[in-house]
Image (cartoon, helix red, strand yellow):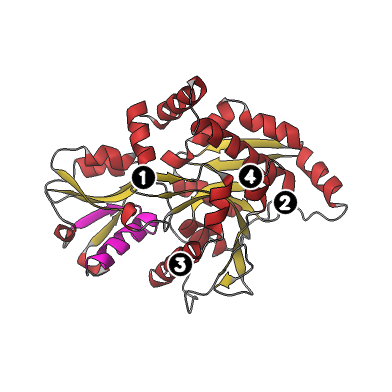
Amino acid sequence: MKKVITLCVVGLAVLASVFTSPAVAADKQASTDKTYRYVWSHYTGWEPYQYMVDSGIMKKWADKLGVKIDVVLINDYVTSINQYTSGEAVGCAMTIMDALDMPAVGGVDSEVEVVGDYSNGNDGVGLMNGKKFTDIKGRDVLIVQGSVSSYALSRGLQKHGMKNSDVKEVNTSDANIGATFASSGSKGACVTWNPILMNIRNLPNVTLVFDSSEIPGEIQDLMVIRKDAPEAVKKALVGAWYETMAVMNGQGSQTDKAIEAMAKFAGGTVAEFKAQLKTTFMYYSPKDGATFAASPENKTACRQVMDFCFAQGLLGQGAKSADLIGIKFPDATVLGDPKNVKITYTTTYMKAAAEGKL
């Protein structure tokens, strides 16, 4: 699944100026004066972004809202988050963990506009010549270090009564991890996400010994946009996303062609892509995404992520507790420091999409 990552550099460029009243007029003017970049990377639940572009759905919504938006694929997930953090992009597809341990730590004020899915088996641990999770003990584990792969590994170790020190993480980029694992020898171990995970689990003598279906709701895949971005940009991206979801989750030739296009762009077959969708709990409906964002289950999942990031040192050397950064929820409650809220789950645009009011 994508996922991050090293701690970010503080001292970020500010992306856009602050707009004052009259809000609507200022927002419209600002939106028409520049092109806003939204970046994403390969992952089953994010392949719809390319279909949004190629089908013309993104342009339709941008034109409707009077904005210019480029939705851009970045082949390396870490790079996409770096671009968002540094101000090169107004939004980015990322997990809640990565929103916390990189842009939030760097001072970027973000909103979660869409809860797109959670990994329900898309992230996992594969072993060469191992049949159970505990066979991982003592092995070198290929991993995108500091990412949600580290989170999945840590949760797997926790669930099996093991310690992080029972394995050695070997930092490997998502671009190379599949090939490196394939040649790693009889004691190879790897933690990664789809579509890479599907490829490695099909190798001879490989067993998938743990996956994210055992920690539902914890690895969330989100549409994250800077809080100070123009409202028109947020509306256009959310509107285009849910129109794409309606096509993707429909029936008939349009849906078939959309799935075929996504599979091809992801570098696999339709059958492979559909198999990956089965391990992705998609929130096709904006109402369902909004419901999860506001749920007690979301707060519990975020608490797990915050505690993990602190324990792993991902909140920075100066962090004295897991509550360094505040995460705000739709009911206005805050986990962490209410004076340092850097991530806000908002249901504003998901609800508007559900009501046809974008």
Q: Position of residue 325 (x, y in %)?
A: 55, 70
Residue at figure coordinates x 55%, y 42% from the top left: 39
Q: Going by the image, does 174 lie left or right of 332?
A: left
Q: Residue furthest top?
A: 253
Name the amino acid, label 3.
Thr
**Can I make out residue 100 in this image?**
yes
In the rendered image, which quarter is residue 268 located in?
A: top left
Local SS, label 4: helix
| Tag of residue 174 | 1
Report crowding for label 3: few under 14, some 14 to 19, many 20 or more residues within 10 A (C-alpha): some
Residue receiving disc 4: 354
Locate the C terminus by quadrant. Answer: top right
Residue at figure coordinates x 83%, y 42% from the top left: 29
Q: Going by the image, does 192 lie left or right of 220?
A: left
Q: Which residues are magenta?
A: 139-160
Residue at figure coordinates x 49%, y 62% from the top left: 298
N-terminal label among 2 and 3: 2
N-terminal label among 4 and 1: 1
N-terminal label among 2 and 1: 2
Q: Position of residue 123 (x, y in %)?
A: 34, 49
Name the amino acid, label 1.
Asp
Between label 4 and label 1, give the one nearer the viewer. Answer: 4
N-terminal label among 2 and 4: 2
Local SS, label 3: helix
Residue receiving disc 2: 16
Q: Is residue 157 magenta?
A: yes
| Tag of residue 300 | 3
Q: Are marks 2 and 1 in contact (CB under 8 Å)?
A: no
Local SS, label 1: loop
Q: Going by the image, does 30 lie left or right of 296?
A: right
